[in-house]
């Protein structure tokens, strides 16, 4: 016959101590959660203020040229077309508001880009006007006319997925949208588009819009790959005909 364990008497003081411990732990966790939420809210508020100030500033193209050459050229190249092999993005012709937001997000820790953290911390890049001048200069540069493509085997899937899931925010031709901080996708390399879409899908871009995270999370690897390949082949706008070296002189007097 199976022997039953004897009843163990529980001291009333121990019961009260146990309840007190769990009550303390619950309150501590609640307070810590509230502190984290307040900290996140402060970060979001600060970032929003910096972005608003930058967008309200008058850009100085001469400063934009100087800032780019001093802080960005070594990685993104003389034409700001990036490096597909190193998965360094092209930032030429990119939406100005998007560029400002990403620089602020990186500075505030809302986007993890290790190699960029020391760059955005440099004194010359901390003012809203500097961010505005740099982003305006980059926006005026011609996008990369020959970005890296994928293998081209799933373009039909890519086009269908893009038009159903991406076009509303990024535009029919991948031109992006200044008002909604939506980035331009045309002129970007396949490897970068695929890498970032996968990072957003698993929540590694903290500042990404929740709707974008949920949308990309629901796509298969085949669909993400196909969309990246299709987007990398979107045609560039015909009006982008000026040369980067013309901007330094023609825009320098806009102070």
Image (cartoon, rainbow, N blue to C red):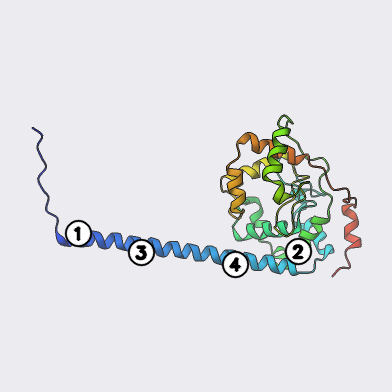
Q: Which residue is mark 3?
A: 27
- Classify mark 4: helix, strand or loop: helix
User: Mark 4 or 1 closer to N-term?
Assistant: 1
Placement of the C terminus among the 4 image quadrants: bottom right
Q: Position of residue 159 (x, y in %)?
A: 73, 38
Q: Nearer the viewer, mark 1 or mark 2?
A: 1
Q: Are marks 4 and 2 in contact (CB under 8 Å)?
A: no
Q: Which residue is mark 2?
A: 132
Q: Nearer the viewer, mark 2 or mark 3?
A: 3
Residue 113 tag number: none
The image quarter containing residue 24 is bottom left
The image quarter containing residue 70 is bottom right
- Classify mark 1: helix, strand or loop: helix
Q: Nearer the viewer, residue 133 or 40?
A: 40
The image shows residue 109, relative to residue 162, as above or below, that is below
Placement of the N terminus among the 4 image quadrants: top left
Q: Which residue is mark 1?
A: 15
Structural distance between the alpha carbons of marks 2 and 3:
44 Å
Q: Residue at x 81, y 64 (%)?
A: 63
């Amino acid at each position: 016959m199976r022997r039953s364990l004897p009843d163990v008497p529980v001291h009333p003081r121990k019961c009260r101590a146990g309840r007190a411990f769990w009550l303390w732990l619950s309150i501590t966790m609640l307070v810590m959660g509230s502190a984290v939420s307040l900290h996140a809210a402060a970060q979001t508020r600060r970032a929003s203020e910096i972005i608003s100030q930058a967008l309200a500033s008058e850009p100085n193209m001469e400063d934009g040229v100087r800032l780019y050459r001093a802080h960005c050229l070594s990685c993104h190249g003389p034409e700001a077309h990036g490096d597909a092999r190193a998965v360094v993005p092209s930032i030429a012709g990119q939406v100005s508001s998007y560029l400002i937001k990403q620089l602020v997000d990186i500075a505030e820790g809302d986007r993890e880009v290790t190699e960029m953290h020391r760059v955005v911390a440099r004194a010359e890049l901390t003012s809203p006007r500097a961010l505005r001048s740099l982003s305006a200069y980059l926006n005026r540069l011609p996008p990369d006319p020959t970005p890296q493509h994928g293998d081209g085997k799933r373009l039909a899937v890519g086009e269908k997925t893009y038009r159903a899931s991406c076009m509303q925010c990024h535009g029919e031709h991948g031109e992006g949208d200044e008002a909604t901080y939506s980035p331009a996708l045309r002129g970007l390399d396949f490897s970068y588009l695929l890498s970032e879409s996968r990072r957003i899908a698993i929540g590694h871009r903290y500042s990404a819009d929740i709707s974008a995270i949920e949308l990309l999370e629901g796509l298969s690897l085949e669909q993400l790959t196909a969309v990246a390949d299709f987007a990398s082949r979107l045609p560039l706008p015909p009006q982008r005909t000026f040369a980067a070296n013309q901007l330094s002189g023609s825009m320098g007097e806009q102070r």
